[in-house]
Image: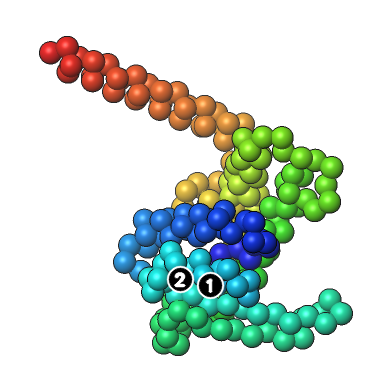
């Protein structure tokens, strides 16, 4: 499911690139399956999805009507795909049996609350893109590997998303995360060094 981004006309090129990235990731992870994409009613989403995916995805919109800051009506529109295809995709989904944007909206809120740079009306500003990306990486590590989720409670055990996905057998610490990352960087540099030496020897021969 795709985040319901607020974007004016000046950000359409960036949004188009975002959808293209999602399309590439979906092809790698789902193989021949058509990804299910659900957004709000922002009109450019429909144009972007049709341009990138054409008929290679299932695309729907969830339109919420509000009055006095309360939702009084929810309309679901199936834009690309048939009713049967949506029913099958939702049946195979682990998230919900209804078209909605609730999960991604909740995730967006969690990220905003955990990242000072993304808080609305904040005095904190990322002066470089690298700073923002680094902070988001830390938030992602904390969310997936350190923070137990109440929705993943099984008896006395409360798991992290990484534990539930089988990537870890216990809750990790920041010390372990940073040490692992450091080792991976060193290993990657060693592999590159070995590769460059092998290329040099091949050319010399």
Q: Secondary structure at mark 2?
A: helix
Pick the quarter of the image with the C terminus.
Answer: top left
- Can residue 138 be seen here? The reply is no
Q: Is residue 115 left or right of residue 196?
A: right
- Labels 1 & 2 near each other (Cβ < 8 A): yes
Q: Is residue 113 left or right of residue 32?
A: right
Which one is in front, 64 or 164?
Answer: 64
The image position of residue 130, as x and y in percent, is 62, 35
Compute the Cα span from label 1 to label 2: 6 Å
The image position of residue 118, as x and y in percent, is 73, 49
Q: Residue furthest left?
A: 205
Q: Quadrant of residue 150?
A: bottom right
Residue 189, compared with residue 71, is above or below; it is above
The image position of residue 154, as x and y in percent, is 59, 63
Pick the quarter of the image with the N terminus.
Answer: bottom right
Q: Which residue is mark 1?
A: 46
Residue 51, compared with residue 59, is above or below; it is above
Q: Quadrant of residue 156?
A: bottom right
The image position of residue 32, as x and y in percent, is 31, 66
Which one is in front, 20 or 96?
Answer: 20
Estimate how packed mark 1 is, as few (under 14), some (14 to 19) or many (20 or more) residues with alpha carbons within 10 Å.
some
Which one is in front, 2 or 47?
Answer: 47
Q: Which residue is mark 2?
A: 50
Q: Secondary structure at mark 1?
A: helix
Estimate how packed mark 2 is, as few (under 14), some (14 to 19) or many (20 or more) residues with alpha carbons within 10 Å.
some
Q: Is residue 126 left or right of residue 142?
A: right
Which residue is rendered at x = 45% and y = 71% of the image? 50
Which residue is rendered at x = 37% and y = 63% of the image? 30
Which residue is rendered at x = 71% and y = 35% of the image? 127
């Amino acid at each position: 499911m795709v985040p319901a981004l607020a974007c004016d006309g000046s950000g359409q090129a960036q949004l188009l690139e975002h959808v293209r990235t999602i399309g590439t990731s979906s092809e790698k992870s789902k193989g021949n399956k058509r990804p299910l994409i659900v957004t709000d009613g922002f009109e450019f989403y429909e144009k972007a999805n049709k341009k990138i995916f054409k008929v290679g995805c299932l695309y729907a919109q969830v339109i919420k009507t509000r009055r006095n800051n309360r939702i009084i009506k929810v309309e679901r529109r199936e834009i690309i795909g048939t009713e049967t295809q949506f029913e099958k995709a939702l049946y195979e989904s682990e998230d919900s049996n209804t078209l909605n944007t609730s999960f991604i909206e909740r995730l967006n809120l969690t990220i905003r609350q955990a990242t000072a740079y993304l808080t609305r009306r904040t005095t904190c500003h990322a002066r470089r893109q690298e700073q923002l990306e680094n902070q988001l990486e830390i938030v992602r590590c904390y969310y997936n590997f350190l923070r137990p989720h109440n929705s993943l409670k099984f008896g006395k055990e409360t798991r992290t998303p990484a534990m539930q996905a089988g990537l870890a057998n216990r809750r990790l610490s920041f010390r372990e995360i940073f040490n692992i990352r450091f080792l991976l960087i060193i290993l990657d540099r060693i592999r590159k060094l070995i590769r460059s030496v092998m290329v040099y020897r091949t050319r010399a021969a």
